[in-house]
């Protein structure tokens, strides 16, 4: 039997109370700790949830521009953390720590005003991994292959998604930065070659474009093997160099600044391992020229390009003619080729076997773009300009002698326009060249009249009407050729009869292949033989003499035709027998017919 106080005796009520009171602080502390842990977990979870919302990011005023651009971007339904936090728990904790640090710096006033972050490729590829497998795709007018840029090294460098997509396009969230593409493709490259070749990114347009007064079908570029750089050129400006002083905007350690020339190291650190925008270091390269209205001077510079070493801009008669400027008393008239953006090198091309210090333009350059038939137009321009310059030169020299040593101002203007065409070669802009020569002739006669001298006649023939055809076929009135086996001259038709081009020719787009005129040989006879008959309503019917058959049939003397009497010799009958066409042919019919029994008048049997 146990008694109170024995070790084995049960505790009394007082002892049990004292034991409960002794353990209460421990329980209270444990409960408080558990409560604090629970509150911490809830608070942390709530903080993580709240801080994961885009609205939280935009609550900081320095983030407002980025938040606003995100709201208008294609990523507006994707939370910031989906891209700014890479996959994985450790990345989540690291980024949350960085975010809380930013909040702390914000409230303590120790934050910077230029927030900066890096996006891992893994974050992008969670949604865009298919882009690596899709192959080439057309983005705007550029053929692009994501796999080639992300999987393979480009020009010795490993790229990241943010190498091309960045925030430096103001107001556009994580957009493609075309200035970076241009820098990478064009720096240190010859235009049209390597990574700077046009077809690497652009397909040849399958459309007709209009530039100024020129209409151009890009399909001809492929058909004739044209080089894009004949018409398109990168404007003058930066070559993408890196000014050394840009390094000190981020770095001040001498050891790092000494690495300035180590391009492999710099690109690995700035492009591959970290995201530093290319234009933070490089000057930008301009890919295309600005709009024409705002960049007329730049276009003139571009037209001269490498030629300016001899033909200084503003002092070159060739460039003045091409741009349609520099004349006196004549409205500026740019060449259609200049309006279309064709530079000097577009026509002054290097020909195989014709090397030299100067690339001389020739009919080959015209045919390279416009086809073999354009040679006739080039030659008519060249010969026509030379002929008019030679004819006007004689009148200028004659007038200079007649006026003596103090010619009037009108003669100076005439001499200026004449010299511009003579030195600049009219073929650079035939329309403007002919306008200058016409004005020069007018001023020449004005100078003569001021001194009581008789005016001189225009030393060339011109079409007495305006026609769209003359934009290319200026000076056609001087052209001769052969049609339907007969000699043909444009002058009597264009100048004499004042026939518009459309009387005989269809527009180029309506012509059949190989067509020159809209009718067969009988189409000529409809006018010429009718006039020779003296029919009412024609020139002959009004009392004019019959048309001279040999004007069109000059080659008939070289021909012998079969007849019932054997071979008939036209030359013998015309030149030795003294016969005329009307002696043997009935000119009253259309077409004329051989007279019946015509041979019996001279021959027996």
Image (cartoon, rainbow, N blue to C red):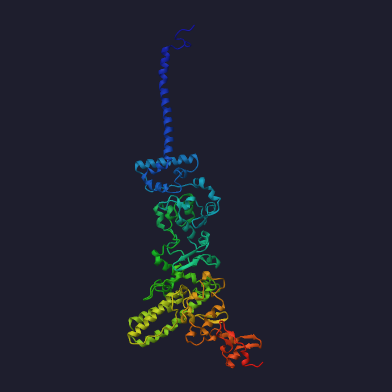
The image shows residue 100 at horizontal and vertical percentages of: 41, 40
In the displayed structure, 532 sits above or below 294; it is below
Q: Position of residue 452 (x, y in %)?
A: 33, 87
Asked which quadrant contains residue 516, the reply is bottom right
Q: Residue 258 versus residue 172: which sits nearer the camera? A: 172
Look at the image and tell me whether residue 369 can be seen: no
Number of marks in the image?
Answer: 0
Residue situated in front as seen by the camera: 249 or 28: 28
Seen at 39% across and 87% down, the residue is 398
The percent coordinates of residue 352 (x first, y second) are 55, 72
Q: In front: 78, or 508?
A: 508
Instruction: Evaluate whether residue 302 shows in this view.
Output: yes
268, 570: nearer the viewer: 570
Where is residue 323? Give x, y as percent.
42, 71
Vertical order, 401 against 97 (above or below): below
Q: Quadrant of the C terminus?
A: bottom right
Residue under the point 63% across and 88% down: 568
Residue 252, above or below 476: above
View extreme (top): residue: 1
């Amino acid at each position: 039997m146990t008694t109170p106080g024995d070790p084995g005796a049960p505790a009394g009520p007082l002892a049990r109370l004292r034991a409960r009171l002794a353990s209460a602080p421990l329980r209270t502390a444990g409960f408080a700790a558990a409560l604090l842990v629970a509150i911490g977990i809830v608070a942390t979870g709530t903080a993580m949830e709240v801080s994961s919302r885009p609205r939280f990011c935009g609550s900081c005023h320095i983030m407002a521009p980025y938040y606003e651009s995100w709201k208008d971007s294609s990523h507006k339904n994707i939370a910031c953390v989906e891209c700014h936090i890479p996959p994985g728990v450790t990345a989540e904790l690291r980024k949350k720590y960085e975010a809380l640090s930013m909040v702390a710096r914000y409230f303590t006033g120790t934050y910077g005003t230029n927030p900066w972050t890096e996006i891992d490729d893994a974050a992008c590829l969670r949604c865009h991994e298919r882009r690596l497998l899709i192959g080439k795709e057309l983005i705007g007018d550029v053929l692009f292959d994501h796999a080639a840029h992300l999987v393979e090294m480009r020009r010795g460098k490993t790229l990241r998604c943010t190498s091309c997509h960045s925030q430096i396009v103001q107001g556009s969230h994580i957009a493609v930065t075309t200035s970076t593409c241009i820098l990478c493709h064009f720096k240190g490259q010859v235009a049209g070659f390597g990574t700077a070749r046009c077809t690497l990114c652009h397909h040849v347009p399958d459309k007709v474009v209009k530039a100024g007064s020129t209409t151009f079908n890009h399909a001809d570029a492929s058909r004739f093997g044209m080089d894009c750089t004949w018409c398109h050129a990168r404007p003058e400006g930066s070559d993408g160099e890196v000014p050394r002083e840009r390094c000190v905007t981020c770095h001040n350690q001498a050891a790092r600044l000494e690495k300035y020339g180590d391009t492999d190291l710099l690109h690995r650190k700035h492009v591959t391992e970290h995201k530093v925008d290319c234009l933070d270091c490089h000057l930008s390269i301009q890919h295309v020229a600005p709009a024409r209205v705002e960049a007329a001077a730049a276009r003139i510079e571009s037209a001269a390009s490498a030629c300016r070493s001899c033909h200084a801009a503003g002092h070159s008669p060739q460039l003045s003619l091409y741009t349609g400027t520099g004349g006196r008393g004549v409205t500026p008239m740019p060449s259609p080729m200049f309006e279309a953006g064709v530079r000097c090198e577009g026509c002054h091309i290097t020909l195989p076997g014709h090397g030299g210090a100067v690339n001389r333009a020739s009919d080959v350059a015209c045919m390279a773009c416009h086809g073999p038939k354009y040679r006739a137009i080039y030659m008519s321009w060249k010969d026509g300009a030379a002929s008019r310059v030679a004819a006007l030169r004689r009148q200028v020299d004659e007038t200079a002698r007649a006026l003596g040593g103090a010619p009037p101002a009108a003669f100076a203007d005439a001499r200026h326009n004449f010299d511009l065409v003579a030195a600049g070669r009219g073929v650079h802009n035939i329309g403007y060249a002919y306008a200058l020569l016409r004005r020069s002739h007018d001023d020449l006669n004005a100078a003569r009249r001021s001194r009581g001298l008789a005016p001189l006649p225009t030393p060339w023939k011109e079409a007495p009407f305006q026609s769209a055809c003359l934009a290319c076929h200026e000076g056609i009135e001087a052209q001769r050729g052969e049609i339907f086996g007969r000699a043909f001259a444009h002058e009597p038709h264009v100048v004499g009869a004042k026939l518009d081009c459309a009387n005989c020719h269809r527009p180029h787009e309506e012509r059949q292949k190989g067509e020159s005129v809209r009718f067969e040989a009988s189409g000529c006879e409809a006018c010429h033989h009718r006039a020779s008959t003296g029919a009412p309503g024609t020139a002959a019917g009004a009392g004019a003499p019959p048309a001279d058959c040999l004007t069109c049939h000059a080659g008939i003397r070289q021909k012998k035709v079969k007849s019932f009497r054997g071979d008939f010799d036209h030359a013998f009958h015309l030149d030795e027998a003294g016969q005329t066409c009307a002696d043997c042919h009935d000119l009253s019919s259309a077409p004329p017919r051989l007279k019946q029994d015509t041979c019996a008048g001279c021959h027996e049997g």
